Image (cartoon, rainbow, N blue to C red):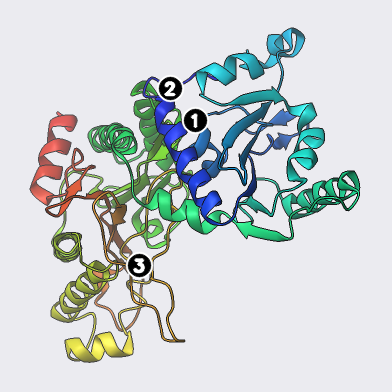
Amino acid sequence: MSLVSPVHDVHVYQARRTRVLQWMHDQGGGVTVIPTGEPSLRNATNPHPFRFDSQFYYLTGFTEPTAWLVMVARADGTSESILFCQPKDPDTEIWDGVRWGPEAALVAFGFDQAHPIDTLSDWVPKALVGAPAVFAPLHRAAVADLPMQLQRWITTARQQSRGMREVPNRWIDLTPLLSRQRLIKDSHEQAIMRQAAHIAAQGHCEAMRQVKPGQAERSLEAELLRVFLQGGAQDTAYETIVATGANACVLHHRAGHSVIKDGDLILIDAGCELHGYASDITRTFPANGRFSGPQAALYDIVLAAQAAAVSLTRPGASFNAGHEAAVNVLCQGLIDEGILKGSLAEVIETRSYHPFYMHRTGHWLGLDVHDVGPYRLTELDGEEPDWRPLEPGMVLTVEPGLYIRPSDQVPEKFWNIGIRIEDDALVTDQGCELMTRGAPVERAAIEDLMSAGMR
């Protein structure tokens, strides 16, 4: 059975649906449809593990495939939420596991109605007759042909109404509304994300303890996965990055057969998924347990850049403030080490730092690793919109880095050094909580942890 998670609280999901229904009423009412999608094949008859659609899960807590959420906001002020899901089927359940079925799901997940999925295409057109609008996540739908399906249902509704009642003449995208709601994590979400961060941090610590020159990158990936799953996570949150030596200068290098060498720095970007929510951590550490002089110099620059960004991860500061602070520190450090020439202002204005730092310092985090939510305020009067100010309950990563490839313009001692330090920050009333600091970032703490593991 697709079990309800230990932290499942049906009232959380009911409250989220109530907020959406109230907004639908404010827009004049109508019908919302949100699918969760189907499993996809990995090869032949073997499917990929199914992962529910984030929008659907946010409003339902339901994890099975082949399901739809329908919400109706009527002109008389009444509303209801209906789940369509796979029915009970003993023969299929022998192979694929027990299903909830509509009757059990109705109670467990707090819906007003629940029906078998094969009744969806009869039920929806009837609900659309007399509805002024249809609402759907048009820009993040789990079903590729959702607009075509909606049009088919509207056409059927029009035929059934025989011109006596209206059918929806407005399509309203739910994506912006759900994205704004998901941007602020409630206490339920924060508790899950703290635990996901804790589990992931333990995985990074174990990788530091277990590393030895001569191992393949994938051996560390295996340690991370073991700790994640033993800690209660359901999966990794994204494809794990384990990059040794020059591979660390490739931003999305996947753990492979490259052998870890004595003297290498190892960059690991790995997080776990717990009850749908992602953690996202990057740590960089020396294979032999001791940073060399050039490695230490660049590492301290990145750590200082992260500290500058963290200091501006607080209510009222703009989303971009931390990035700008990190860039200032990184650029000054590159100038001090002779990697860049010119004044700080010149380096920033000309973006001559870009070959060494080419990504932003953070992104939203939640049900998606790069979570939904606007980074800028709505554009006004054709002007460039301002960056969104941070608010308590937002969760974002803070992840500056430096990536130094061989170049005649760069001192050779820095070649092939890639460093990134990433933590997950929950914005609080006073500042931010770094939920992932169970994995050390200070050089001395990393070396102490690795020394204990190498004894």
- In the picture, the quarter occupied by the N terminus is top right
The crowding category of the residue bearing disc 1, from other C-alpha atoms within 10 Å (few below 14, some 14 to 19, many at least 20), is: many
Q: Residue at x 18, y 47 (%)?
A: 433
> Vertically, is 371 above or below 50?
below
In the picture of the structure, the residue carrying the numbered disc 2 is 5
Mark nearer the N terminus (1 vs 2): 2
Which mark is drawn over residue 61? 1
What residue is rendered at 46% in x and 54% in y?
179
Q: Where 167 sits versus 298, above or below?
A: above
Disc 3 or 1, which lies upstream in sequence?
Answer: 1
Q: Residues within 10 Å of mark 3 (few under 14, many from 20)?
A: some
- Is 50 positioned to the left or the right of 188 in the image? right
Q: In 3D space, how far apart are the residues under numbered discs 1 and 2 (Cα atoms)?
A: 9 Å
Q: Is residue 425 visible?
A: yes
Q: Is residue 374 above or below residue 412?
A: above
State the SS at label 2.
Answer: loop
Question: Residue 22's x, y, as percent?
Answer: 49, 46
Residue 216 seen anywhere in this rendered image of the structure = no
Three-letter residue code for mark 3: Arg
Residue 423 position in % (x across, y down): 26, 50
Q: Determine whether, in the image, residue 75 is placed left or right of residue 258.
A: right
- Report the mark closest to the observer, 1 or 2: 1
Q: Looking at the image, which is closer to me, 397 or 230?
A: 397
Q: Residues within 10 Å of mark 2 (few under 14, many from 20)?
A: few
Whether the residues at callouts 1 and 2 have beta carbons within 8 Å, the answer is yes
